[in-house]
Image: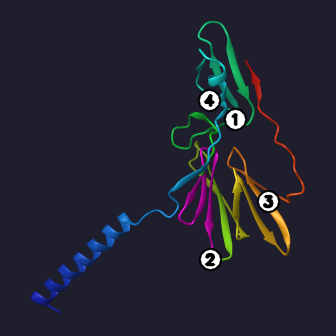
């Protein structure tokens, strides 16, 4: 192919590639949040609501720090912070569970959790942790039978006639347990 036909072919190919690129840029993210399903009040917000006049200080690893701007300092100590993978700042765990077009997502924690439909009878749970210092992402993906969202951060599934609970934690971790085993999580320690 030479001459005018080659030029027409090149123009048609360029137009097709342009349309394909535009479509790729506008295709919706299947993991984008559609609706918030659970967003409990974060510990720092609870502290500030119950202690008027106090202000939050810069958070540190495992510590949400506060001051009354006079002489007192307060802290919530425990598994309450994580390092933001973009800025490196220590931020409070403020988990938000949302539905997506293919499942659910948990944000506002050390690990990002995506729960995606894998066919019609399974879901894949993917936990991703990104280390700020190295920018290395560690990924764990586990496939379960079809999950059903119950409430809060609790899901369940049935395998071989046995019911199991899958619970997402406030740090973006997940735990698997039979529903007849219930252990309440210890509350964070608060020092006003």
Give the numbered dot on residue 80: 1
The residue tagged 4 is: 45
Q: Write down the quadrant of residue 175 in the picture.
A: bottom right
Up/down of 74 relative to 123, above or below: above
- For the record, the magenta segment spans 98-119
> Tag on residue 165?
3
Residue 116 painted magenta: yes
Quadrant into which the C terminus falls? top right
Query: Which mark, residue 111?
Result: none
* Circle 2 or circle 1, nearest the eye: 2
Q: Of marks 2 and 1, which one's residue comes earlier in the chain? A: 1
Q: CA distance from mark 4 to mark 2?
A: 40 Å
> Residue beneath label 2, please?
119
Contact between labelled residues 3 and 2, with CB atoms less than 8 Å apart: no
Q: From mark 3 to mark 4, how far is it between C-alphas?
A: 29 Å
Between 53 and 12, the residue placed more toward the observer is: 53
Residue 19 on the magenta segment: no
């Amino acid at each position: 192919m030479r001459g005018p036909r080659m030029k027409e072919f090149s123009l048609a190919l360029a137009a097709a590639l342009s349309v394909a690129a535009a479509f790729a840029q506008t295709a919706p993210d299947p993991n984008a949040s559609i609706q918030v399903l659970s967003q409990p009040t974060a510990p720092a917000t609870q502290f500030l609501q119950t202690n008027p006049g106090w202000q939050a200080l810069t958070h540190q690893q495992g510590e949400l720090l506060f001051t009354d701007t006079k002489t007192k300092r307060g802290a919530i100590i425990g598994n309450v912070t994580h390092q933001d993978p973009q800025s490196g700042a220590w931020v409070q765990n403020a988990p938000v569970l949302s539905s997506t077009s293919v499942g659910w997502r948990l944000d506002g924690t050390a690990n990002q959790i995506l729960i995606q439909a894998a066919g019609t009878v399974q879901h894949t749970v993917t936990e991703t942790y990104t280390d700020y210092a190295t920018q290395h992402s560690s990924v764990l993906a586990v496939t379960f039978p079809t999950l059903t969202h119950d409430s809060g951060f609790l899901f369940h599934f049935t395998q071989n006639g046995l019911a199991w609970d899958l619970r997402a934690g406030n740090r973006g971790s997940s735990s698997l347990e039979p529903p007849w085993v219930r252990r309440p999580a210890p509350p964070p320690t608060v020092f006003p």
